[in-house]
Image (spheres, grey):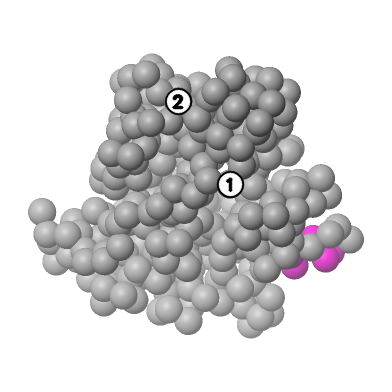
Amino acid sequence: MQEADFNFTFSANQLVAHFKSSNISLHIKREDLIDPFVSGNKFRKLKYNISEALKSNSTTLLTFGGAYSNHIAATAAAGKKYGLKTIGIIRGEELWKDVKKTLAINKTLKYAVAHGMQLHFISRETYRNKEQPDFIENLNAEFGDFYLLPEGGTNSLAIKGCEEILNEEDKEFDYIGCSIGTGGTIAGIINASMSNQQVLGFPALKGDWLSSEIKKYSTKENWSLVTNYHFGGYAKVNSELINFINLFKKKYQISLDPVYTGKMLYGIIDMIENSKFPQNSRILAIHTGGLQGIPGMNELLIKKNLPLIDV
């Protein structure tokens, strides 16, 4: 298979904390440093999909996402890099009513448009049909042929890319922590993990549907979900989480996004402090990027009169 020329595929592990009382070490795999916008798991998910699009002579990528989607921004950036047109089907038709205002206050969508993405806004009700064959046929009729990327980018090629997150030096860890959106990233990590390692998934959404999604792409059983650190659901935050993210950045000079990695690391440290890990455990947390969404989150926090995330 022809591969897209992603010129950086290795990310280093950084020791961030050693808990002396339990002799537990916590490292972070800095996937966020791969690229400012095509970073972390988005880089991994897009790598082989773009290779396949190029191989099949596709000229257009079409995908789905919300107004602050990391995947939308990453697809736009990758499309521009490799000369592919991009179309984003965006949830929320009300955003189209005053699109100039939308782009003025929404840095994610503004970035996507600046990188050549054509935005198409649809209602939330219609958006629920995004996987239905007749809906896809209607998109083909409207936009012509395209290479389809699912919401969040998860498919078999994305899993292949995410299997490359772990490398030889990661075999030394007992636990691997990963935030979860659609389940693709953690499925790849599970596939690449050693049988003696335990992979912990921290869902950003409420609900128990993720286990079945992960099982579609992995047959291993050395994993479990930690479901009590979602802070109320997808993109929900409070002052406690924001203060944790800001303190973490001040202490370790590492920015965390509030939707995924911030919640995961809050959870891991809380579990360490409450003796949920055996003594002498070596923990590796995967930083999946997503930092481009912080300005958009801060816009929402201003409206809610909550503290802002340091950028």
Q: Is residue 62 left or right of residue 64?
A: left
Tell me if residue 12 comes above or below residue 221 in the rendering: below
- Distance between mark 1 and mark 2 Cα atoms: 16 Å
Q: Which residues are magenta?
A: 298-304
Residue 250 falls in image quadrant: bottom right
Q: Position of residue 171 (x, y in %)?
A: 34, 32
Q: How many marks?
A: 2
Q: Position of residue 200 (x, y in %)?
A: 51, 28
Check residue 302 for magenta coloring: yes
Most frequent secondary structure within the magenta stretch: helix
Q: Residue at x 59, y 19 (%)?
A: 279
Q: Position of residue 255 (x, y in %)?
A: 62, 59
Amino acid type assigned to the residue bearing label 2 in the image: Asp
Q: Which mark is residue 16?
A: 1
Looking at the rendered image, the quarter that the C terminus falls into is: bottom right
Q: Is residue 50 left or right of residue 134?
A: left
Q: Residue at x 73, y 38 (%)?
A: 231
Identify which residue, 155 or 45, lies in the foreground: 45
Q: Secondary structure at mark 1?
A: strand
